[in-house]
Amino acid sequence: MRVNRSMHRKLSAVATSAAALFFGLMLLATPGYGQSIAGRWTAIGKTMDNGEVPKTILDLKQTGNVLTGRLVGLGYGVDVKGTAKGNHFDLYVIDWNDKKPSVVGDLVNGELRWKQWNETYVAKPATPADEFPKLPYITPPALHNVPYNGLAKTPPMGWNSWNLFAGKIDDKTVRTMADAMVTSGMKDAGYIYVNIDDTWEGVRDAEGNLQSNHKFPDMKALADYVHSKGLKIGIYSGPGPRTCAGYPASYGHEVQDAKTFAAWGIDYLKYDWCSAGNIYKNDALQPVYQKMGDALEESGRPIVYSLCEYGMGEVQKWGPEVGGNLWRTTGDISDTWTSMIANIEKQVPTAPYAGPGHWNDPDMLEIGNGHMTANEYRTHMSLWALTASPLLAGNDIRTMTAVTKSILMNKEVIAVDQDPLGKQASPVKDGELETWIKPLADGSVAVGVVNHGATAAQATVKASDLNLDGAVKTARDLWAHKDVQFAGGAYTASVPSHGVLMLRVSAK
Ligand code: GLA
C-alpha cells in the first residue's frame, strides 16, 4: 500500500498516541508514580516493652512544594512544615526554635519512609481506623498553694537512667547501679537517689492501677533493695496520657498513681509534660502540676517532686506553689560542650528563684559519657555546682575511670553545690572569660572562671568583685585541691580552653 502524506501524518499521530498511552500505562504501573506525598499516612512501630504496638500518623497537605501538616505519635503531637522535592521531603516542627528539618524522607513504592529523631518510619496510606482515641478534657483545678514537703533542702543528688540507657533500663541494671553507688564512693560523696526514667511503665489493670512492664517485675522489691543500700529510689511519669516515650502516664489517674508510687516506696517523682501539651495550653501548666503536687501530699509519703516541662511558663515563679522541689529550666541536654553551655545559659534568668527546697534544674549530668574532654566535664560540674543545680549523674557509675570519679566526686566542688544558703551564681562575661560568683553560708564565696575560647587564657579573680566581708584570708583552688595566695587583691592563673578555674575564697 502506498502511503500518502496525509495518511503518513495520521499513522504517525496514531503511533505517537499509542506510544504515549503505552508509556502512560507503564508510568501508572510504576509504584509511587502519580501518588503524592500529601495525604494521611500511618507507620506501625516496634512493639513496646509493655506489649503495645505504637502508631505514628503523619497528615500532610501540599501547596506547590510547601508541605504543612501534623505528626502524631503516642505521647506527642506537633504541627510540621517543610518542602517536597519530587519524591523527597523534609519537615520541621513549627513550635520549636530549631527550624532544622527533624523529619526527612521519601515516597518509595507507594510507602512514605522517613527518619525522625534517629528512628526510621515506614508508613502506608492511613485507614479511617487509624485514629488516636479522643480523651475527655479534664478541667484543671483552681489554684491554691501546695504545702512544702520539707524535702530537698539542698539540691538533690543521685543518678538517673535516661542519659545513658534511655529505653534500655531494667531491674537488674538499676540494682547494679545501686550497688555501684555504694562501692564507687558516690553514696559517701552525697549521691543518694537512684532514679528510673521513662520506659518502666506497663499497662493499667482493670481497676486502673498502673503496673510496671516485664523489665521491672516487682517495683516494691526493687525499692526495698535500693533502700537496703541506704539509698533512695525515684520514678518517672507525666500529667498527660502518655510519657515522652509513649508509655502510659498519669492523666486522670494522679491520685491513684501517687498512691501506687507511695505503696512501692518511691522517694522521688520526675513528672514530664510531653503529651499533656496535646490536651492543655501552657496557661494550664501550673494547675496541672498542682494536681500531682496535691496527690503526692495526699499519698502521705515524702516524695521529692521534680517538674519537667523544659522551663515553659516561667516555672521558676510558681514551681514552689505546686509543691515542686526542682524544675527543669531547659530542653534535653546532650553530651556536647554546646548543649551543656546552652543549658546553663538558659539557667541564668532563673537565679533569683533558687533556694532551699526548690531548685532550678538545667538537666542531668553528662560527665563520664565520653563526648566531652576532661576539662569540659570539670566545667560542667563546676557550673552545676555554682548554680546550685541538682547533681544527677547520667553515666555508667559501675565502670567509671579515675578521671570521671575525680570530677563527679570532687567533695570540695560538691560542697559548693550543697551549700545550705542555696544561692545560684550569675555570670559576668568579659570576652571569652565568664565569671560566676556564688555566696556561701559561712560568708565565703565560690568563684568559677570559664574559658569559652579556643586557646588557654589568663584569668584574674579580683577580691573587690567578691563582696567579701574584709580582705582575703584564705583561697583554695577546688580542682587543684591546694591553697593559693591573693597578691595585691587578685589571683591570676592560666585556664585551658573550655576549662575552668574554681576557687573558694574567704575573709575569715
Ligand atoms: C523528656 C525528658 C528527658 C527524658 C525523656 C524520657 O525528653 O526531658 O529528660 O525524661 O523525656 O522519655
Image: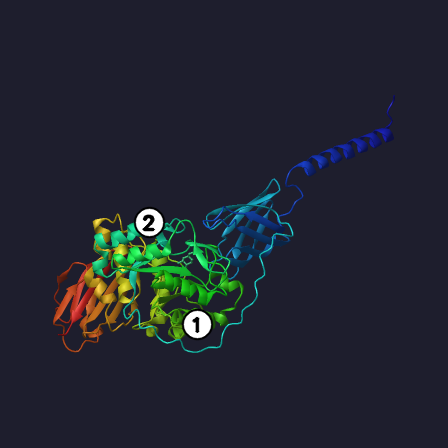
Residue lying at the far front in this picture: please name it: 207
- In the rendered image, which residue does mark 2 sit on? 173
Q: Quadrant of residue 302?
A: bottom left
Mark 2 to mark 1 CA distance (whole Å): 32 Å
- In the rendered image, which residue does mark 1 sit on? 290
Neighbour tally class for label 1: few under 14, some 14-19, many 20 plus, Cα within 10 Å: many
Q: Is residue 308 visible?
A: no
Residue 176 horizontal/vertical position (percent): 29, 50
Residue at coordinates 26% horizontally, 47% vertically from top-left? 399
Residue 507 horizontal/vertical position (percent): 14, 74
Q: Quadrant of residue 508?
A: bottom left
Q: Is residue 192 visible?
A: yes
Up/down of 8 relative to 348, above or below? above
Please tell me which residue lies in front, 454 or 78: 78
Left or right of 210 on screen, residue 18: right
Residue 191 horizontal/vertical position (percent): 26, 60
Q: Secondary structure beneath disc 1?
A: helix
Residue at coordinates 22% horizontally, 57% vertically from top-left? 409
